[in-house]
Amino acid sequence: MASCIGLPEAALADVPHEFLGRWSTDPARCQQVNGEVDVLEVTPSGFKLYEIGCALMPAARSPRAVRFVAQCYKGGSPTKAGTVVIQRLSPDKIDVALLGFSWTSEKPETFQRCRDGR
C-alpha cells in the first residue's frame, strides 16, 4: 500500500495483530455490498474499506484503542493526512473512526470479525 500513496516503507505502522484480517458490518455476509455491507481489510501497515485506503504510521496505544496518524484517500481523491482510531469493543468487534477527513463522517463505524477468520 505504501508505494501507491508515496510513503516510505519504514514510516509505516505495525498494526497490532488482534486487529488484522477481515471485518464486516454484517459478518454473516462478509462481502462488500454497496449501501448494505461494508468490509474492512486490515493489514500490518494499513487498511482498505470501500473506496478508502489508508497507510498508518506508528500507533499510540491505550488499553482498548489504537490511534494512528494516517494518510488516506477516497476513490480518486488526493491523499490526505488525518487520524484513524481503532477501538476494541469485544474480542470480535471493533469501532473504526476516521478523523479529519472532509469526505467522511467522524462517527465510528462498528465491524465484526468475518466468520471465515481471515
Image: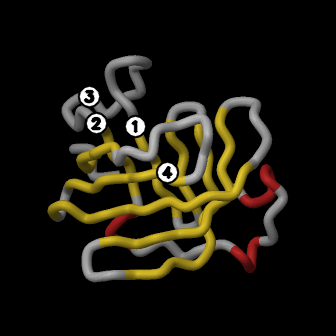
In the image, taking residue 3 as reference, residue 11 lies left or right, namely: left
Q: Amino acid at mark 2?
A: Thr
Label 1 sits on a secondary structure element that is strand
Label 2 sits on a secondary structure element that is loop
Label 3 sits on a secondary structure element that is loop
In the image, taking residue 33 as reference, residue 69 lies left or right, namely: right
Colour mode?
A: secondary structure
In the image, taking residue 97 as reference, residue 116 lies left or right, namely: left
Question: Is there CB contact under 8 Å for labels 1 and 4?
Answer: no
- The residue at the far left in this view is 90
Neighbours of disc 2 within 10 Å: few (<14), some (14-19), many (20+): many
Residue drawn at x 42%, y 52% as measured from the top left: 97
Q: Position of residue 3 (x, y in %)?
A: 80, 57
Which residue is denoted by mark 1 in the rendering? 39
Residue drawn at x 54%, y 76% as measured from the top left: 14
Residue 88 figure quarter: bottom left
Neighbours of disc 3 within 10 Å: few (<14), some (14-19), many (20+): some
For residue 98, which numbered disc appears in the image? 4
Which of marks 3 and 1 precedes in the sequence? 3
Q: The N terminus is located in which quarter?
A: bottom right
Which residue is denoted by mark 2 in the rendering? 25
State which mark lies toward you, 4 or 2. Answer: 4
Q: Amino acid at mark 4?
A: Leu
Residue drawn at x 62%, y 58% as measured from the top left: 82
What is the distance, in whole Å, between disc 1 and disc 4 at their CAs?
Answer: 15 Å
State which mark lies toward you, 1 or 4. Answer: 4
Q: Position of residue 113 (x, y in %)?
A: 26, 50
What is the distance, in whole Å, between disc 1 and disc 3 at their CAs?
Answer: 9 Å
What is the distance, in whole Å, between disc 2 and disc 3 at their CAs?
Answer: 9 Å
Residue drawn at x 32%, y 69% as measured from the top left: 18
For residue 29, which numbered disc appears in the image? 3
